[in-house]
Amino acid sequence: MSWAPILILVAPLVAAGLTLIDGWRLARIVTCVSALACLGAAVASAIAVEHGRVIILASEWIRLDSLGAVFLLATAFLYAIAAFFSIGYLQGQEGESSFPGFARRYFFLLNLFGWSMLAVPLAGDFGSLWVAIELTTILSALMVALDRTDAALEASWKYVLIASSGLGIALLAIILLYASGTNVLGEDYVPRFAHLLGAAGGLSDDAVRLAFVLAVVGFGTKVGFVPMHTWLPDAHSEAPAPVSALLSGSLLAGAFYGVLRFFQVAVAAGDGAFARHVLVVFGAVSLVVASLFVLRQGNYKRLLAYSSIEHMGVIALGVGFGAPLAVAGALLHVLTHASAKGLAFFGSGSLLRRYDTKEVDGVTGAGITAPWSGPIFLAAALALCGLPLSGVFRSEFEIVCGGFAQPAYVGVAILIVFVNVAFFGILWHAARMVLTPAPEGAVPHEASAWMVGAMLCCLFVVVALGVHLPSDLSTLLDNASERLSVPTR
């Protein structure tokens, strides 16, 4: 399936170019075709690397293994759903005079944004990885500011400043790791993942540890780790709903993928225990702080943003626990969180179109006035809370079981307590929006069948991952976790 990664890197660029010809009629067709092609190619690529094979193309500049395939699947899935949801999301503005220009900018940037995020797990070395993640920053910042309101422009500017500072620290981590590698690989080499993993035994322990901490702080700024998270609630709140879904389910995960590549080198260099402890600390702090902020949010998009920080903390804890089951659960959580949080942001976008407010108190009786979007939004909230039969429940259960097996009792206790704190916060706010009485005289109405259809597809995946995990996906996750598991010693 060597053609699949090439298709993934070409299709969104072609679609972006075609949107400049016609920003609405042609743009929505080519965007959906591109997104579906990328999803199919991502699935084909994942099957190809399922049993440990590595796809290498373009003189190793393009590389995909089982670990990268997990993140590729999450991004391709959300890109596809967002493409279809966007048709309905923009449809209501079709009569406005500024609509043609807005639609052209939207679909052009959406395809470029999807392309940049798909390029992250396909990068073959640390330099290309950094460039790809930097591109996601630039393009996502433009999408956050797309509505051109004062709040959106402020959120975008804040995001660029903080994320760029973080990526500067991440670049320093790469330089430090590269410099340490010159002692083994010579002064002129490309920092390929495979090269540094093979030479990890000869790297300086101090350099590897410092590089890992810098990578966690640098890339962790985009992951949303506390205390580098301050850009995230504003950006997620102001971005269009499909963009918020991609930011939460794909962008944050892509940045965490960068951390995991450094984690691999630390494990290979014999510093896995140190790296694991660093992730547990950042994961626990992020989980605790985010879950407490969830309780007091009055803006439902900011509520979902803090939930994203919480779930990134859960993933970090899963990898930090180190047990194979916990690591596999963390990687599964990348997929389950992407589907559930994508569904939640899609639902929020539909409710925003219906009620024209982002405030929790401004949305009442959504279960009646929005007969599809309201219940789907509540279902997304329940899934994010880890309701049994949802994918999030399965992945969090695996993380907890793996934590007990390690054993990492303190980390597991923090995880259980504060996941439940977030559970009550999210469920309380979502129930107030959906289950309260509808305003008098309200007429049941949905903004668009396109949005409902996209949400139902997303909901199907959320439930399917909880009810039954396909054997091929399970094998992929097991192989990916083997690349990250820290031996107990």
Image: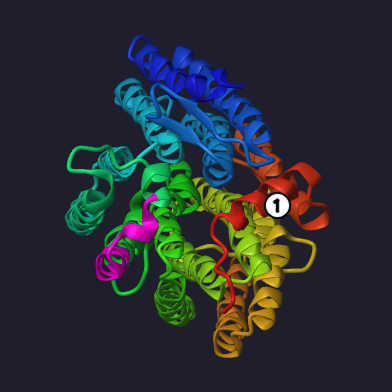
Q: Amino acid at mark 1?
A: Val
Q: Is residue 387 magenta?
A: no
Viewer can see residue 352: yes
Query: Range of the magenta residues?
Result: 199-213
Q: Residue tagged by mark 1? A: 462
Residue 441 at least partly seen: no
Spot occupied by residue 346 in the image (x, y as percentages of width and height): 55, 47
Q: Quadrant of residue 384?
A: bottom right
Q: Is residue 289 above or below residue 441?
A: below
Secondary structure found at label 1: helix
Quarter of the image with the C terminus in it: bottom right
- State the residue in front, 462 or 323: 323
- The rendered magenta stretch, by its main secondary structure, is classed as helix
Along the line of sight, the residue nearer the viewer: 181 or 154:
181
Question: Dividing the image into 4 quarters, which one contains the N terminus?
Answer: top right
The percent coordinates of residue 414 (x first, y second) are 55, 86
Residue 231 screen position, x and y as percent = 28, 61
**Which of 260/336 is in front?**
260
The residue at the point 75 percent across, 45 percent down is: 460
Q: Position of residue 291 (x, y in %)?
A: 49, 78
Left or right side of 98 for 197: right
The number of discs equals 1
